[in-house]
Image (tube, rainbow, N blue to C red):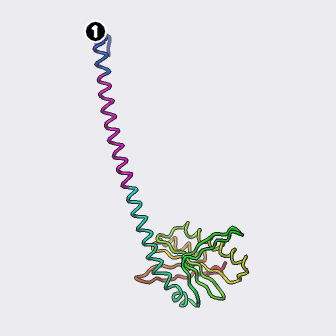
Amino acid sequence: MTTAQHEAEGPATFEKVWEMFQEIGRKQAETDRKMEATDRQIEATARQMKETDKRVGELTNRYGEISEHMIVPNLKFSFNTLGYTFEKCSANTKIEDFTHGIFAEADAFLENGDCVMVVEIKTKLRIDDINDHVTRMEKFRAHADFHRDTRKYYGAIAGLLMSESEKTYALKKGFYVLEPVGETFTITAPTGPGAPKAW
């Protein structure tokens, strides 16, 4: 505002100052209303996202249960075609060795007098899952050693969804890879020196 404009309007009076504060108050109230509306929208979106996450989680769990029911009962027969003869297949096998501090769980555990196959089943296979299975195999091997179990331990990993790079990575780690095909699944054996890897 120029000096001429200020002089034309005259000195600030109580009424002018009061009017200015009222205008500021109205603008502040409008801003507050807009912020409250935005907050409500954010809360509604958060609730919707939480509900979506819950439903996806339930679907993933259900999908995982279906995959286990599809895969586990057929494991013995499928590995027989690869030259194994497993006498026993157990689902959800746990190790809880408090004495040695070893805790692990496998979705399926096939065994005979010579070897063991530890199987992990995932809906969406990731690199981290494969690395976790390596750690799981090490724990099962350590537990076996403490109990004078000299059998060879092999690993297999199943994924309903997996990329080619994840499949290749699992095979390089020495694992058998299980993939669904229709109502059954195929098993790809790792190749190369020392494959399949025995723990």
- The location of residue 5, given as percent across then percent down, is 28, 12
Element on which disc 1 rests:
loop
Q: Is residue 86 visible?
A: no
Q: Amino acid at mark 1?
A: Gly
Q: Residue at x 42, y 71 (%)?
A: 62
Instruction: Locate residue 48 relative to residue 68 in the image: left or right.
Output: left
Q: Residue at x 64, y 71 (%)?
A: 96
| Snapshot quadrant of residue 10 | top left
| Snapshot quadrant of residue 33 | top left
**Residue under numbered circle 1:** 10
Residue 121 or 7: which is nearer the viewer?
A: 121
State the count of labels: 1
Asked if 143 appears above or below 75 in the picture, the reply is above
Q: Is residue 46 magenta?
A: yes
- Magenta range: 22-48
Asked if 148 appears above or below 103 in the picture, the reply is below
Q: Residue at x 58, y 80 (%)?
A: 109
- The location of residue 120, given as percent across then percent down, is 54, 75
Residue 44 or 155: which is nearer the viewer?
A: 44
User: Predominant secondary structure in magenta?
Assistant: helix
